Image: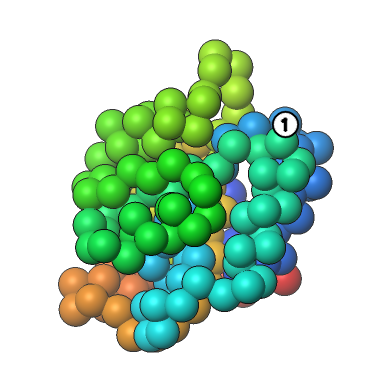
């Protein structure tokens, strides 16, 4: 099932080198929040993640947060990171991905990469609109009940794969 297969599988957003993204021609980076940038167990935006997002921007990449979440915290993260946000995204539906890319300043010919921790939402949705996607290991095992159901499917799909770094 290629539409459920990530283009890359990594241990964390922190191992993604913004210079590598630039050298691959990407200009827009769509970022999931829960268990990708922020642990669902702690809900804390770490200094390391703040610095990583700052390094994306320093390289000229244009990030945008893309989340199914609608709680106040997502607005706080967007404000603190000083990047646009698309919330209540209803991923994997494609319209939110396109909206997030536009909010990040997407222009014709720009390459977009999505970074997220879920196959059913992040990977599938990214592939529906033709974007590349980097799947990262979730930061915490704590999650919503329905996400835990999808995690069982993810384990089956990724059973022979280990994060690259």
Q: In this orientation, does residue 158 appear? A: no
Where on the picture, by quarter, is residue 107? top right
Q: Nearer the viewer, residue 34 or 164?
A: 34
Q: Which residue is most to the top?
A: 108
Q: Position of residue 120 (x, y in %)?
A: 32, 57
Q: Position of residue 47 (x, y in %)?
A: 63, 73
Q: In this orientation, does residue 64 appear? A: yes
The residue indicated by pointer 1 is 25
Where on the picture, by quarter, is residue 12? bottom right
Q: Reply above or below: 140 against 15.
A: below
Answer with left or right where residue 31 lies relative to residue 60: left
Q: Which residue is most to the left?
A: 146
The quarter of the image holding the C terminus is: bottom right
Q: What element does badge 1 sit on?
A: loop
| Residue found 32% across the figure and 65% down from its top | 73
Answer with left or right where residue 123 lies relative to residue 93: right
| Residue found 50% across the figure and 72% down from its top | 45
Answer with left or right where residue 61 lies relative to residue 90: right
Q: Nearer the viewer, residue 14 or 55?
A: 55
For label 1, count other residues whose C-alpha is less than 10 Å away and answer few (under 14), some (14-19) or many (20+): some
Q: Position of residue 60 (x, y in %)?
A: 71, 36
Q: Position of residue 85 (x, y in %)?
A: 38, 45
| Residue found 68% across the figure and 48% down from its top | 56
């Amino acid at each position: 099932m290629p539409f459920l297969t990530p283009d890359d599988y990594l241990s964390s957003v922190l191992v993604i080198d913004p210079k590598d993204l630039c050298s691959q021609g990407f200009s827009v980076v769509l970022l999931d929040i829960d268990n990708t940038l922020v642990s669902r167990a702690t809900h804390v935006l770490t200094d390391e993640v703040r610095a990583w997002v700052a390094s994306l921007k320093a390289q000229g990449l244009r990030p945008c947060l893309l989340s199914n979440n609608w709680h106040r915290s997502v607005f706080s993260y967007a404000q603190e990171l000083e990047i646009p946000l698309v919330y209540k995204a209803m991923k994997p539906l494609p319209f939110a991905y396109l909206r997030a890319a536009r909010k990040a300043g997407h222009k014709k010919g720009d390459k977009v990469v999505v970074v997220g921790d879920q196959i059913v939402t992040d990977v599938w949705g990214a592939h529906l609109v033709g974007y590349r996607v980097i799947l990262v290991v979730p930061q915490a095992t704590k999650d919503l009940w329905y996400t835990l159901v999808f995690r069982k499917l993810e384990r089956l799909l990724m059973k022979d794969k280990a994060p690259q770094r």
